[in-house]
Image (tube, helix red, strand yellow):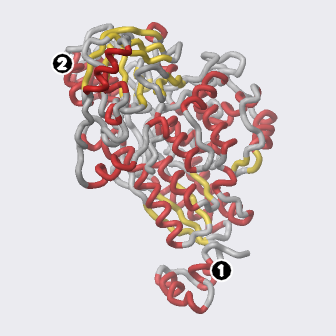
Amino acid sequence: MALRSDQIKRGVARAPHRSLLKADGITDEEMERPFIAVVNARNDIIPGHTHLDKICEAVKAGIYMAGGVPFEISTIGVCDGIAMNHEGMHYSLVSREVIADSVECAVAGHGFDGMVCIPNCDKIVPGMILGALRVNVPTVFVSGGPMLPGVAPDGTPTDLNTLFDGAGKVAAGTMTEEELAYFEDTACPTCGSCSGMFTANSMNCLCEALGIALPGNGTVPAVYSERIRLAKRAGMKVMELVGENVCLKDILNEAAVRNAMGCDMAFGGSTNTVLHLTAIANAAGCPITMDTWDAVSARTPHLVKLAPAGPRPLIDLYRAGGVPVVLAELDRLGLIDRDARTCMGPMGDYLDYMHAACAGADGEVVRAHDNPFSAEGALRVLHGNIAPDGAIVKKAAVAPSMLCHTGPARVFDSEEEACAAINGGAISPGDVVVIRYEGPAGGPGMREMLAPTSAICGRGLSESVALITDGRFSGATKGPAVGHVSPEAAAGGPIALICEGDSVTVDIEGGRLTLNVGEDELARRRDMWVPPAPKHDHGVLAKYAKLVSSADKGAIVI
């Protein structure tokens, strides 16, 4: 069969190319086989990525077993936890685009026949998907898997969020530094992505729903031997796709995106998934809007409540059967497109197998379709005069008492200003904290606000204080935290017009985000508003700020 890699290894004119390949150790026999890129995000700084060399070797073994020739290539990554609450977080979302660019350059530049992507954490997963869509070759994803949870002295599970909340408790005087040190040493006990349904694990689970990863991709723990076997099968699977010439866009299309959105609403993923899936849908040629998200939320029941929405770590979902169980429950309601193609074949055939061979929902970790935690999805889209183009909140992680809240605005033009006020005791019950000029362009980079939301929780204010921002949130965020407010402040969005003390209503149940100020006054403020100067005038952040779209469009670079 004709191969894409023939352009670098066939004919007299390609003798120089073959010589360079032979310098890599490639034999004449291997020249006849498909060349497969193994895109590995392994590095020494991200705990979710330190073990990806083992995953990569297993993938390469699977490719060899199935008759291909693997070539490992690398991408960068940024650990959102380590980058949190300082200058480094400006670079997190930006890295998604750098990763996409690097995948495109390496795979297209060398004429690979197929690709296996090995991400694990936050922006690496969507970055690789975006890059893979651009080159559109047969592709399979296999992640590094989640870490095991820590264990508190009382036997309850702990995770990274325990530390962020703990820092707030120490500042409030409700936890000692010695107690915090115990959690510091134990909350992240193994390699792997953080152990709750945070952004990394949300995206890795959604890869299964998109059909681009094998079952278990999102839930098999990083340290289990099952993860190595899964990686070998991923290497073998990509060779099947190459043989059938099934490219990524044959799988990742409108049907796949809708299935993933429904699954996301059912298991209560990170609000970052809205940003990433919107960007992915655009790259796949099937754009979605905040109204699309709203419609999916309205018809999809919430079936899984893992940390931060509840106390359970992700390993509980693994033990309950993983993402396939969630898909099967949604299928019983007719909410999964059975005609969607997956890397394993038709989604309908896969679901039929699940219905016949598996026990189904356990009723605790995964609720049955007719006994959900709530009739609507775990994420909620808000509109209103503060967010004409939409905003997003993880409704599943909000206390019932805060589903509708009105209070005075406490306005801050940066995350740092807000954190100083919260940690200094300047925020009172009933307040609505507004953090602006942290959007995609204004940040730039749309920083995650886990530090201020955790400080609010740590000071015992999560059921009395709301927070809204044009920035975004970590998947670990809980409480009435509304992000992705669009248009952002730097673009002249209404969030820029809020003044200290203004009455603001956050109505999550009703889907509204309202500044209770008259139109005449808003018009006066709009006339007086002056666009701020860019925060960066050189480097990647300056370039990103000039090119990035709004959050409701997925913060894509255009």
What residue is drawn where x is 42% and y is 52%? 97
- Up-down relation of residue 209 to residue 70 (above or below): above
User: Which comes before the other along the chain, label 2 or label 1?
Assistant: 1
What residue is drawn where x is 56% and y is 90%? 13
Judge left or right: residue 533 versus residue 297: left
Crowd around label 1: few <14 · some 14–19 · many ≥20 (10 Å): some
Q: Position of residue 267 (x, y in %)?
A: 58, 28
Q: Which residue is mark 1?
A: 32
For residue 424, the mark is 2
In this rendering, which labeled residue sits more in front, label 2 or label 1? 2
Q: Secondary structure at mark 2?
A: loop
Judge left or right: residue 224 versus residue 480: right
Judge left or right: residue 87 versus residue 520: left
Does residue 122 show up? Answer: no
Whole-angstrom CA distance, mark 2 to mark 1, is 67 Å
Q: Position of residue 464 (x, y in %)?
A: 36, 9
Q: Residue furthest bottom?
A: 12
Judge left or right: residue 408 versus residue 226: left
Does residue 481 show up? Answer: yes
Query: Is residue 518 or residue 548 the one in the foreground?
Result: 518
Q: Position of residue 37 (x, y in %)?
A: 54, 65
Q: Secondary structure at mark 1?
A: loop
- Up-down relation of residue 276 to residue 376 (above or below): below
Q: Amino acid at mark 2?
A: Gly
- Up-down relation of residue 488 to residue 445 (above or below): above
- Up-down relation of residue 525 to residue 414 (above or below): above
Q: Position of residue 320 (x, y in %)?
A: 63, 30
Q: Amino acid at mark 1?
A: Glu
What residue is drawn where x is 56% and y is 80%? 8
Q: Are marks 2 and 1 in contact (CB under 8 Å)?
A: no
